[in-house]
Image (cartoon, rainbow, N blue to C red):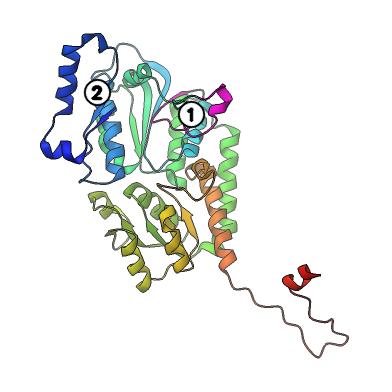
Amino acid sequence: MLLSTGLAEAQGSDIARVVRQFREAHPRHNGVAILTVNTPDFFGSMENGYSAVIESVIEQWVAPTPRPGQRPRRVNLLVSHLCSPGDIEWLGRCVEAFGLQPVILPDLSQSMDGHLGEGDFTPLTQGGASLRQIAQMGQSLGSFAIGVSLQRAASLLTQRSRGDVIALPHLMTLDHCDTFIHQLAKMSGRRVPAWIERQRGQLQDAMIDCHMWLQGQRMAMAAEGDLLAAWCDFARSQGMQPGPLVAPTSHPSLRQLPVEQVVPGDLEDLQQLLSHQPADLLVANSHARDLAEQFALPLIRVGFPLFDRLGEFRRVRQGYAGMRDTLFELANLLRDRHHHTALYRSPLRQGADPQPASGDAYAAH
């Protein structure tokens, strides 16, 4: 993969033409797949670069017109950066549960761990879709594009596919997750597996159990557009109030969020907003931990980077199971912040027991 930089973009360098000239001069390397992506570092953010890579894969590697025949058991999944490796693994399991074969782009489910199970160390990551599978994506039974930033990628794949391409902004509300599962059932002609129905029931129980702790709580956020869309919808669906919100760049999709204002900026801007708009929770990456300590807010770590918690990349947020566990996490964090009424012991009580020793005093004995 060749990614342009700010200097190359400012110079107007055509990296695609450079690759064509290289192939003409060295035809023996024509069998090596090379992906070129324009990623100027003076435009957009990580989300723009991530979606640009997926768009380039479809434009350069997927056949422009569907090849003869169809892959009737394959389902394509285009996943945004909002999906963690744990989320992607859950998505793949759901597709396989209906007897279908997932082709995930990009498939990061095996790239972060488990590499020692295959034997000795290897410098290459595991998993991922093969070039052959990517070239045949147009022949698949259907496709899903999960993430607002993948709208153009979904449009490009639609032009190259026989099957339908279903776009979903995320899977952090019951409605969107139901749509995903029902479409898989429709494609496969099978009933929804029992374990998926059970996870949905568990989510409904969690919504009831956690409602009293989450209702009316204010959730501040600093994240990319796809994450803001997912967490805003999730918060509103559970009776919480999203805001204040900060995004790294201004993007037209931010105007569709169900809030009055999204401020383009950084954590310093969020610090100023929190001084005037108090919140109960903070959703951001690991760089916001100092900000969370300053305002005594529980930090829910999402996005990139996540460097101060082990195994955080395995945490599932999407789907029934992800929403269920996230609800319990938020409710427990808010419960810990709750100031419980101190136990009252009447001094007039007959034969009153002495005041129990504190934890420190007990440990000293």
Q: How far across and how far down the image is residue 286, in percent?
A: 44, 53
**In this picture, residue 349 sits left or right of residue 79:** right
Q: Quadrant of residue 157?
A: top left
- Confirm whether the magenta stretch covers residue 167: no
Quadrant position of the C terminus in the picture: bottom right
Near-viewer residue (179 or 356)? 356
Q: Tell me which amino acid carries mark 2.
A: Gln
Q: Residues within 10 Å of mark 2 (few under 14, many from 20)?
A: some
Left or right: where 204 falls relative to 230? right
In this picture, residue 45 sits left or right of residue 130: left
Q: Mark number for residue 18?
A: none
Which residue, given by chain and number where applicable, does mark 1 sit on? 95
Residue position for label 2: 60
Give how far across and how far down residue 22 sits, in percent: 18, 17
Q: Residue at x 25, y 36 (%)?
A: 152
Three-letter amino acid code at the position of disc 1: Val
The residue under the point 17% across, 25% down is 16
Task: Look at the image and tell me in which quarter the N terminus lies.
Answer: top left
Q: Secondary structure at mark 1?
A: helix
**Looking at the image, residue 176 lies above or below residue 92:** below
Instruction: Tell me the magenta residue range.
Output: 98-121
